[in-house]
Amino acid sequence: MSDINFEQRKTIEQVEESTELAPKFDRDGLIPVVTTDFNSGEVLMQGYMNVEAFKKTISLGEAVYYSRSRETLWHKGKTSGLVQKIKEIRIDDDQDCVWLRVDVQGGASCHVGYRSCFYRSIPFGDKSGSTVLKFEEKEKVFDPKEVYGDAPNPTKL
């Protein structure tokens, strides 16, 4: 990991038009990450990386995030076995957002047990004003209690 260096951000041209990797982390030291299935393009999850997580992801070829709720690095799948193997890493034009295209070992990315963290849809355009969520995924890929036991839910309310 020590051989991975991020460039200092110097100019707009450097950030937008050069081959230099100069990511912009927010004031909390994080950069958002959108993760999709490499083959289908399905959005699996959205997370964050700090500098260390981003460098480990590049080095390992597997997704490593920063968990804001646990305030620690999170090697996706280390506990569950549902590792996200990197097929491609992209960065947006102003280098403040990362896109991971992955192959998910075990077929799921959501800690709730569904394939995607985006397993519900929100109705829109309805004059009734209903915001009842609709489950788009009907079955879980795995049982979170079997995989994680009684570990606390990582979602903070």
Image: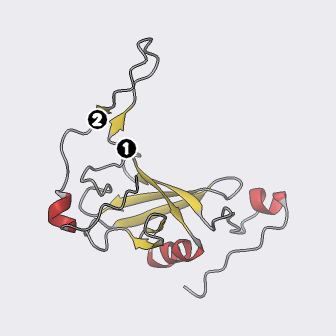
x then y, percent, for residue 139? 18, 43
Q: Residue at x 43, y 15 (%)?
A: 126
The residue beneath circle 1 is 118
Q: Is residue 66 above or below residue 17?
A: below
Tell me: 146 left or right of 114. left
The type of residue carrying mark 2 is: Glu
Tell me: 45 left or right of 25. left
x then y, percent, for residue 3? 61, 86
The type of residue carrying mark 1 is: Phe
**Number of numbered markers:** 2
Q: Secondary structure at mark 1?
A: loop
x then y, percent, for residue 106? 23, 61
The residue beneath circle 2 is 136
Q: Local crowd at mark 1 within 10 Å, few (<14), some, or many (≥20)?
A: some
Q: Residue at x 43, y 65 (%)?
A: 86
Return the residue nearer the eye: 39 or 63. Answer: 63
Return the residue nearer the eye: 88 or 149. Answer: 149
Q: Residue at x 33, y 31 (%)?
A: 133
Image quadrant of residue 25? bottom right
Residue at the far bottom in the pictured view: 2
Residues under labels 1 and 2: Cα distance?
A: 9 Å
Here the colouring is secondary structure
Q: Is residue 151 above or below residue 17?
A: below
x then y, percent, for residue 83? 32, 67
Q: Secondary structure at mark 2?
A: loop
In the rendered structure, are the residues bearing label 1 and label 2 in contact, judged by CB atoms less than 8 Å apart?
yes
Return the residue nearer the eye: 76 or 61. Answer: 76
Q: Local crowd at mark 2 within 10 Å, few (<14), some, or many (≥20)?
A: few
Q: Quadrant of the N terminus?
A: bottom right
Tell me: 41 left or right of 7. left
Q: Residue at x 17, y 61 (%)?
A: 145
